[in-house]
Amino acid sequence: MLRAGLIGLVIVAAACTAPAPTTIAPTPSPTREPGTYAVTAFLDLSGTRGPRGDAQRSAMQQWTDSQRGPLRLKLRIVDVAGSDAKLLVELKRAADAGDTDAFVVGVPATIDDALASAIALVKRPVLFTMPIAEPTGDAARWMFGLAPSPDALARALVDALPARSTPAVIVSNGTLASGREELALATTFRTDGRPMPFVLSAAPEVRDTFSDRSKPFFSGGAAVFFTGSATSYLDPQRIIPAAAIAPGFEFLSYLTDASDASRLGDAAPAVRWPGLRRPSAAGSGTHAATATDALALLALNADAAGDAERTRSRIEGGTFAGIATTYAFSTSRHLGVDPREIALLAWQGGRAVIAR
């Protein structure tokens, strides 16, 4: 009995000295600076993907330098260098850090499952200044498009053809953005009952043979749609000027910016590309104006306490008269641009103007 009692005392003592269960404290939220609203903008400031974000960066920095009002936007610009993977990494980092109230994506991103999942995880408003399709799925409520959809842009381009029977060629540079535009154009031709365009690849791996492959089409006066970034057709062989020698219509992507157009050289008189009517009429760039509108839209609707849901609801529930256009969002419509605001642009006198 004595031995049993001693064993019992040892067990009780061991239980009393055992370490308490470890509890994991939640990561504290960053301290909010009073009167501020943190915005992170993702741009391509390096890399080969176009359009480069220089014009958007300058416009947004100019806006933040001159902003007025009780709530001050703190802008952080991140160069994603043409990498969709880096965009994902930066979004996930922001989700972990909790140091951003809203995001502006100024690159031609593809809303695939990975990006949609990252946006759903972040749970902050994400404004896109480049074309996206109408968002769907769980993350759609956080996404807002400030550019026309690929389908609306395709409609504007096809409607610019002189006749329904005009032969057409779609030139692809092999990127995801180019493929998205190619699909939208082909769908529009099919819907209209027009002759289907021929698709010609100008991807880097077949660039050397492009000139010979394109001659039969360009010499016949066909309309030519160069999809994706214009930079891929300007360097290094300058495909666009070679094609523009032939009679017909040469169209570039909405991704074209003023710096691209300034390098068109002899092709400039023949080339057109879609943009928004209001900034073009004022002599400013579509991309820069849209980037400025993204900040102004957030400043108008931001909740001072950083309530992301309240900010999102305010954007979704109203209209905003910006520099580029007047945006209208609703619970079922997260693309805010009226397609009637699309205009075809041309390069004349050293600047982009509305084509006549």
Image (cartoon, rainbow, N blue to C red):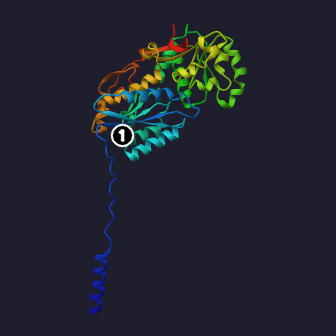
Residue at 32% in and 51% down: 28
Relative to 49, residue 328 above or below: above
Residue at 33% in and 54% down: 26
| Dot 1 crowding, Cα within 10 Å, few <14, some 14–19, many 20+ | some
Closer-to-camera residue (44/61) = 61
Q: Residue at label 1? A: 123
Closer-to-camera residue (318/324) = 324
Residue at 61% in and 18% down: 264
Label 1 SS:
loop
- Left or right: residue 79 compared with residue 62: right
Q: Can see residue 193?
A: no
Closer-to-camera residue (197/57) = 57
Q: Can see residue 265?
A: yes
Closer-to-camera residue (104/312) = 104
The percent coordinates of residue 309 (x first, y second) are: 30, 37
Q: In which quarter of the image is the N terminus?
A: bottom left
Quadrant of the rendered structure where residue 329 is? top left
Q: Residue type at mark 1: give it.
A: Lys
- Left or right: residue 241 compared with residue 100: right
Relative to 272, residue 177 above or below: below
